[in-house]
Image (tube, coloured by chain):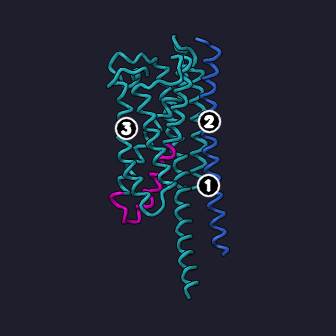
């Protein structure tokens, strides 16, 4: 990424996140039943929005990798896939943590095994397994196996999203795309939520670009190391 | 609902969120430094 573009993006994202924070803590009205703790919602929902977006990017890159793994673009697709999965796990972890800290004062418990929470936890486990597979597996097959796991893993994303519509859950019903008249979200709350989702998506995109660049640098390093090893082996053979 | 505890939870979420993100950015910076160092060592040998 060009340094000037990166600097501009970083400043823009910092301003947007600050505006989002102001919207969430100062502008959005206090919820009548839960009080100020409901403001966790703006970070909780935004974190999951980015996590789902990253898992979507991971799916597309994984499918591309499997279809074109003999081409020069495969390495780039693999770098996109691993970068998106790592960021998805970070945002999913933050969403889960925020949810637990929200649940304790509101529900009186940190965790319950309802459909939404359980499917989200399974999603987190799937992508943590994906990252562990990438890190621990040896040989050329690791990216291929990881890509296959990513495709099956993504099946859980729509299940997580639809779980509060399909089953009775402790988790609240949908507030944006719910059935007509059931949302109950104040317009000022909706604005704060959308600003934060936008800010988090922009932040996620910038960090993703940096993580992708790091992965490409690691790939280049591995290539140089492999070439050096072959050269050393040839020299020793003479 | 315990208002003081609720506020503590709210602050904890906002602070922890940015601590995790900041930590991750530091991890990325460390990654770049490590790659640069290993590349330099390879060039020297």
Q: Colour of chain B?
A: blue
Residue annotated with mark 1: B31
- Mark toward the start of the polypeptide (2 vs 1): 2
Chain of the residue displaying label 1: B
Quarter of the figure with the N terminus of chain A: bottom right
Q: Main secondary structure of the magenta part?
A: helix
> Mark 3: which secondary structure?
helix
Q: Is the residue at mark 2 from the same chain as the one at mark 1?
A: yes
Residue A170 found in image quarter: top left
Residue annotated with mark 3: A156
Q: Nearer the viewer, mark 3 or mark 1?
A: 3
The cyan chain is A
Residue A225 position (above or below residue A50): below
Question: Around disc 1, counting alpha carbons within 10 Å, would you say few (fewer than 14), some (14 to 19), or many (20 or more)?
Answer: some
Q: Residue at x 63, y 25 (%)?
A: B11
Residue annotated with mark 2: B18
Seen from the viewer's position, the closer of residues A197 and A161 is: A161
Question: Around disc 2, counting alpha carbons within 10 Å, would you say few (fewer than 14), some (14 to 19), or many (20 or more)?
Answer: few
Return the x and y of residue A188 as percentages of the image width and height. 49, 20
| Residue A203 part of the magenta-drawn span | no
> Mark 1: which secondary structure?
helix
Chain of the residue displaying label 3: A
Return the x and y of residue A10 as percentages of the image width and height. 59, 44
Return the x and y of residue B26 as percentages of the image width and height. 65, 47
Q: Which residues are magenta?
A: A66-87
> Mark 2: which secondary structure?
helix
């Amino acid at each position: 990424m060009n340094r000037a573009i990166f600097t501009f993006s970083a400043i823009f994202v910092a301003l947007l996140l600050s505006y989002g924070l102001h919207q969430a803590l100062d502008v959005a009205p206090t919820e009548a039943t839960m009080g100020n703790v409901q403001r966790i919602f703006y970070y909780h929902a935004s974190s999951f929005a980015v996590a789902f977006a990253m898992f979507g990017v991971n799916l597309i890159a994984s499918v591309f990798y499997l279809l074109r793994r003999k081409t020069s673009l495969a390495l780039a697709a693999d770098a996109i896939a691993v970068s998106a999965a790592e960021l998805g796990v970070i945002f999913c972890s933050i969403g889960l943590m925020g949810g637990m800290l929200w649940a304790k004062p509101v529900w009186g418990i940190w965790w319950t095994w309802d459909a939404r929470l359980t499917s989200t936890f399974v999603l987190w486990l799937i992508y943590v397994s994906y990252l562990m597979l990438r890190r621990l597996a040896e040989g050329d097959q690791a990216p291929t196996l990881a890509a296959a796991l990513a495709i099956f893993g993504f099946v859980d994303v729509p299940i997580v999203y639809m779980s509060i519509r399909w089953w009775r859950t402790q988790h609240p019903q949908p507030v944006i795309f719910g059935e007509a008249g059931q949302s109950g979200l104040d317009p000022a709350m909706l604005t704060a939520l959308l600003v934060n989702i936008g800010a988090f998506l922009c932040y996620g995109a910038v960090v993703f670009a940096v993580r992708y660049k790091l992965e490409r640098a690691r790939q280049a390093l591995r290539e140089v190391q492999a070439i050096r090893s072959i050269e050393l082996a040839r020299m020793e053979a003479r | 609902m315990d208002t003081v505890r609720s506020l503590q939870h709210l602050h904890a979420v906002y602070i922890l969120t940015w601590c995790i993100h900041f930590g991750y950015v530091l991890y990325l910076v460390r990654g770049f430094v490590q790659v640069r160092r290993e590349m330099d060592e390879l060039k020297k040998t």
